[in-house]
């Protein structure tokens, strides 16, 4: 049986699959929320979900417009503060995975959510960091979810809001940071990072896309291994949970 | 000692040029009634700070009252950007020191605890830090950890002149209860020289004494207490009322240009003598439908 | 995931030589049942820390399990001194790093927040500081404030191997509620590598979700959860039971010499296979009269 | 009418009289508790009472055995933590008066609660600091209450647990501290400190004592001004409040 699904649904499912049971996960706005709830409702029931403003392990029954929406805090186990979540869990070194959305990324997984355009000329100022810089700097690893377009996967980004591997090789370590991004999940493919150069590596292509579809819609060239599998499609159960429990109003997955 | 007063009195205690720490997070528990009255009283030259920029800050910037924001970015969640703040930064009319949530929270925490500086592992390697360095910020420095020799970024304490806190419950001394997550609010209060409480409900001190573990703002920090139901409208207050999606959309539309925003201010701020008139303009039907379900809290 | 286990299992997770952070303050909310089982299992070479030394620490020192205490002083309030700890210090058999309450709390706070060091204005000019300097403590240093040039005393983070927390309420994951003042308990949990919860009552996670603002220990910090009613007896637990004045006096009398204290341990620890046998030795009449009044909380 | 009162009662009343309305007062164990509650119940209703372990403005109806006794927390407005009280109030610089008991004091108001006896030879180890060192170091001023005996008011104390004016003159300032003790209240007299030398100054003698009673029971010589008034005795109202409301069981004032 062929199951229909949207690229957004595949991204959420692919994100969920990266999470392991019992991990502590700091979750940013948007699709990372859907992916994390999906993981927790399926293979990772003992995962801990953290929202920066002071929320641990909520069980929403209604979809909210963002982390500021009390719908997203419903049935939390803990309601506390930035200092409690980002300080005594994240900065203390207890977050296994930081899960972030991005507006722009470069080939080292550096994220820009601050300035679109040329910072020296015309630019558009955006949402900035919130907790994203903190999560990218302090989590043991980071997963990035974003759109796959050449104007988003850019050779050079205008502003590094949240550090990936900076200029590659050991430049992240030189800047005093551990961890770093482990995955970039787009609507066309999943990427990892080369352990030495820290350049982005194509890991799998989402069904329905060709290698050309992937590389021609990027502003830089990923490392391309000889064999590239297709991304495993969502299961019927995963899709049902997303559609009926997590995002019935298609807020994130419209 | 009762510190109860009118919104007008509380706002008039703010000096032009003051540094105000605001309570909102995106579109929840914003100091909207307070911001409206600040605009009516035209108290200008303000510096605003909060971990995550919210509608209260955007409104004040749009009204031309603000010289500088110190914040970690922000938005109106899925309703849109902080258009007034963004435009001010793009135009160069608004100074902005941009951090991350934790770095602003740590700056408040250092202020709260009387620490001279606080080390942090965020910002490093990012353009947030480069930007602060390029403008020769005096709020960042580096220190060698005397225990390991490692070089650490350290931040200067952030000590606002006044924290304005929108809370669900307070007594007349300012012993206040915040329900829901508190984001940076407790650190803001403790860091600031003084605090103004805007409460949805005033209760007797007797009630506060029955739940002393819930008092997250001790009255000793507080200079003024104002009772203002729906004081955060059109943003939400957990366990009180929801955000008004329609008004948020109107706000986002209005904030897309200076001209439209001037009309918004005229219609909803200047022609209202106080927050009650603003609420009357919205109408009891809308307000009533926003009331929180007492089980779910929204 | 349920972390519920027996006291014996929880205690056996402690390695000899471990640094344990204890929950008590003088004669309230002390980890007595845990301490008794530590003594029965003879886990030795321990380092203990807490802001204000309490009966739990004194008992463990008296039983010979402790090499070192890191604390800010302490007593059994008006019942008496921490005689075992004091005797150990006087004899030179117990190493003691002595601070003030805030300096220990700040060391935990630095550990909790992942800070490499924390500045403090206490201790300066005192013999507490001189004593630390004389023994060439590696936990203190000085740093120039990069913003003012002023020299500051800084403390090293304190990161215990395990925090043992006696609480009123927890679920089986370790999401726990402490009623009453929390002294240094939250900072101890967040600083420590892991936490063992001893709870008067285990409730379902459903109950925790109904009062999420009250959860001061998130389960993610917790490795083991033990249910032990009257687990802090003979010390008090706010809203549960009072201290037992008679047993406190007996303890004070017993701790005035090593011989008498050995008898006390024999009678109340070694001859009891678990805390229930100890409580049975005290008897239901005494325990029942200690039960807290639900209005006053004691 | 002559009213009978004990030396302890006079000490508590004299302590209460030093406190002003609206002050923030950090209160240590023992008589300072009685004095603070008395002030709050009489002339200083807007005073804020802080106990280091996380208690603000309790209204006990039963007398406790110390700060660890839940009786003393009854009807508090706030129950929080060391970091909240000693950190964000005291260390932040918001405590007007620190109110401490002492085992030993020298002529500069340095307090010893750690070692009795010779630290190089035989000594007895005592309660140590608790929050006393923090309060003595960080409060804008300190009031000390203690017994008037030659073995307690000593020329040299074995251990400075809580700093007064250290070696006098500007040595406290040199050590990096502001504030300092303003009063020492004993069961025979009230003392202040000379603004320059920072030596202890006799301010008033409790009724029933002579100047000789005071100076002959001290191990150092206080500065003695030409005119020394008698300490004002407790009022009937003050005694009634102490005896009937604050310490009916004579826990502190026996």
Image (tube, coloured by chain):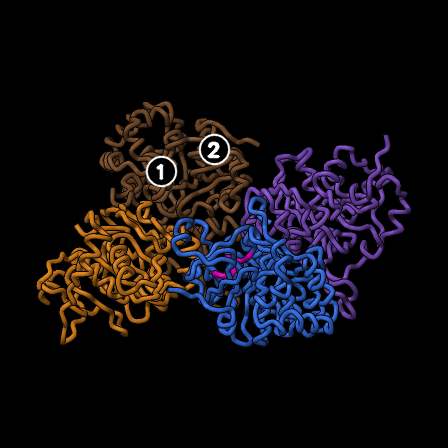
Chain colours: A purple, B blue, C brown, D orange
Q: Closer to the N terminus: mark 2 or mark 1?
A: 1
* Viewer-side residue, D9 vs C8: D9
Task: Residue under label 2, please give it.
Answer: C202
Q: Residue drawn 14% across and 66% down?
A: D205
Q: Does D247 lie within the magenta span?
A: no
Q: Residue drawn 51% across and 56% down?
A: B168
For label 2, the SS is: strand
Name the quadrant containing residue B151. bottom right
Please give left or right for residue C166 compared with residue B134 in the image. Answer: left
Q: Nearer the viewer, mark 2 or mark 1?
A: 2
* Viewer-side residue, A199 vs C283: C283
Can you see residue B119? no
Task: Residue under label 1, please give it.
Answer: C56
Q: Does B189 lie within the magenta span?
A: yes
Q: Magenta residues, as a range?
A: B184-190
For label 1, the SS is: helix
Q: What's the magenta bit mostly, secondary-structure-wise?
A: helix
Name the quadrant containing residue C166. top left
Please give left or right for residue A217 compared with residue A197 in the image. Answer: right
Task: Please state the total of marks drawn on the protein image.
Answer: 2
Chain letter for mark 1 = C
Can you see residue A178? yes
Please give left or right for residue B236 compared with residue C257 in the image. Answer: right
How far, Cα to Cα, is label 2 from label 1?
22 Å
Chain letter for mark 2 = C
Quadrant of the snapshot with the N terminus of chain D? bottom left
Q: Position of residue B268 (x, y in %)?
A: 65, 69
Q: Is residue A183 above or below residue D216?
A: above
Q: Position of residue B167 (x, y in %)?
A: 52, 58
Please give left or right for residue C48 compared with residue B57 in the image. Answer: left
């Amino acid at each position: 049986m062929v199951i229909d699904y949207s690229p957004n649904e595949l991204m959420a499912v692919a994100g969920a699959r990266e999470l392991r049971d019992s991990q502590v996960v700091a979750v940013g706005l948007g699709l990372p929320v859907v992916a994390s709830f999906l993981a927790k409702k399926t293979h990772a029931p003992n995962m801990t979900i953290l929202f920066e403003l002071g929320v641990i392990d909520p069980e929403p029954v209604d979809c909210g417009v963002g982390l500021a929406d009390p719908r997203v805090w419903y049935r939390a186990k803990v309601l506390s503060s930035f200092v409690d979540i980002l300080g005594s869990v994240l900065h203390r070194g207890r977050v296994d995975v930081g899960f972030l959305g991005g507006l722009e990324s470069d080939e080292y997984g550096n994220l820009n959510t601050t300035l679109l355009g040329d910072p020296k000329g015309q630019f558009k100022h955006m949402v900035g960091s919130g907790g994203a810089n903190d999560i990218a700097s302090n989590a043991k690893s980071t997963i990035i979810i974003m759109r796959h377009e050449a104007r988003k996967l850019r050779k050079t980004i205008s502003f590094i809001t949240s550090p990936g591997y900076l200029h590659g090789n050991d430049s992240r370590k030189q800047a005093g940071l551990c961890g770093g991004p482990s995955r970039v999940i787009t609507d066309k493919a999943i990427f990892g990072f080369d352990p030495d150069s820290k350049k982005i590596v194509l890991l799998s292509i989402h069904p329905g896309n060709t290698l050309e579809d992937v590389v021609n819609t990027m502003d830089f060239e990923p490392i391309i291994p000889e064999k590239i599998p297709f991304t495993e499609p969502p299961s019927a159960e995963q899709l049902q949970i997303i559609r009926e429990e997590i995002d019935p109003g298609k807020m994130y997955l419209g | 000692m009762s510190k109860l007063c009118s919104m007008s009195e509380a706002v008039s205690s703010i000096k032009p040029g003051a540094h105000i720490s605001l309570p909102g997070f995106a579109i929840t528990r914003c100091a909207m009634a307070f911001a409206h009255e600040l605009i009516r009283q035209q108290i200008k030259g303000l510096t605003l700070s909060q971990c995550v920029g919210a509608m209260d800050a955007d409104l004040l910037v749009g009204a031309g009252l603000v010289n500088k924001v110190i914040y970690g970015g922000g938005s109106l969640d899925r309703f849109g950007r902080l258009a007034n703040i963004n435009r001010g930064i793009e135009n160069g009319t608004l100074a902005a020191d941009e951090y991350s949530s934790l770095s602003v929270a740590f700056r408040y925490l250092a202020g709260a605890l009387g620490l001279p500086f606080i080390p942090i592992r965020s910002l490093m390697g990012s353009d947030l830090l480069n930007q602060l360095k390029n403008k020769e910020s005096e709020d960042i420095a580096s220190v060698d950890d005397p225990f390991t020799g490692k070089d650490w970024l350290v931040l200067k304490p952030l000590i606002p002149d006044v924290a304005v806190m929108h809370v669900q419950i307070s007594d007349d001394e300012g012993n206040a209860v915040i329900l829901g997550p508190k984001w940076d609010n407790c650190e803001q209060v403790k860091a600031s020289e003084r605090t103004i409480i805007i409460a949805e409900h005033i209760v007797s001190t007797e009630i506060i004494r029955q739940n002393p573990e819930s008092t997250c703002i001790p009255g000793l920090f507080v200079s003024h207490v104002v009772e203002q139901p729906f004081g955060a409208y059109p943003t939400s207050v957990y366990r009180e009322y929801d955000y008004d999606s329609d008004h948020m959309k109107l706000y986002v539309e209005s904030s897309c240009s200076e001209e439209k925003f001037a009309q918004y201010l005229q219609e909803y701020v200047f022609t209202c003598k106080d927050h009650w008139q603003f609420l009357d303009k919205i109408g009891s039907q809308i307000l009533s439908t926003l009331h929180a379900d007492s089980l779910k809290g929204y």
